[in-house]
Image: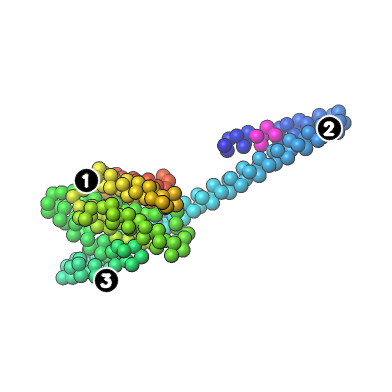
Amino acid sequence: MLDRRVGVSVVAAIAALCAGVVAVATSAAWWGVVAGGFGVVAGTAAAALGGEARTTSDSLRGARRDIQRLSRELDALSATLEEELARATTPESAREKAEHAFDPATGLYDERYFAVLVQQQVAAARRSLRPLSVVIFEVDGLGDADEATRAQALGVVGDVLRRTLRESDSACRLGELMIGAILEDTPESGAVWAAERVRGTLLGSPIGDALTVSAGVACYPSHALGAAELVGQSGRALEEARKRGADRVEIAPEA
């Protein structure tokens, strides 16, 4: 469509120029009218191209803002993980921490509980020699939305996760628009299947056209051996998914 508009604009401009030259050479008024008509066509096509270019530019700026915000949230999550790792020697259990780490907007636990749980799950996976996957979901296209809209969207995604994931899996809200899922005894292929199932369930819902998610997948031990590194790999996979466009799942590169 863009190439067609460019072609129309160029052809119309050339035709207007030629008609104008003929009009001057022959002193024929009707050639001037023809030249004016082609000029209007060229101007209209050029204006349409300018509007489309502005729309594309606005979309690119919005995508860059979303990726920058995502990077800041992932950095904050990494700092939370490091802080909780430093407190790992305290006697307070994950269950006790969960009592004051609940997010009412989504019905899920928050990143403080996630930080504790992912460390415990990685340690358990290491002892039992079983895989463990972390999937970080982010709601697409709501970077500039107000808090109420974000909370409503995350509530829908949280409900889908509770209905889709197994009872042994855990999901927690992370930052403004992210939800992290810890999938026990799950290899890479199973984690991708789970993420795609969540994405497909959202697409099949009544609001599927208005609400989509991107996801990054990382698995212990193929992508990372420690809790912080595993979450970081999942976050980097999510960043790659966002860079490649909305509504997709990406896998972290193997370590």
Quarter of the image with the C terminus is: top left
Which quadrant holds residue 101? bottom left
Q: In terms of depth relative to the viewer, which is nearer, 70 or 40?
A: 40
Sort mark 1 into few (<14), some (14-19) or many (20+) by Cα contacts within 10 Å: some
Q: Which percent across, then down, holds residue 143?
A: 45, 58
10 Å crowding of disc 2: few (<14), some (14-19), many (20+): few
Residue occupying the point 82% across, 34% down: 32
For badge 3, the amino acid type reads His
Q: What element carries label 3?
A: loop
> Is 53 placed above or below 66 here?
above
As drawn, the label of residue 100 is 3
Residue assigned mark 2:
30
2 or 1: tag closer to the N-terminus = 2
In the depicted view, which residue is nearer to us: 243 or 93?
A: 93
Residue extent of the magenta highlight: 8-12
Q: Which residue of the protein is positioned furthest toward the front in this rendering? A: 206
| Residue 237 location (% of width, % of height) | 33, 48
In the rendered view, tell whether residue 225 sits above or below residue 150.
above
| Labels 1 and 3: the sequence-earlier one | 3
Q: How crowded is mark 3: few (under 14 residues within 10 Å), some or many (20 or more)?
A: few
Kindly report the secondary structure that dominates the magenta region of the rendered protein: helix
Q: How far apart are marks 2 and 3 (CA)?
A: 82 Å
Give coordinates of residue 82: x percent, y percent: 26, 62
Q: Are marks 2 and 1 in contact (CB under 8 Å)?
A: no
The residue wearing badge 1 is 187
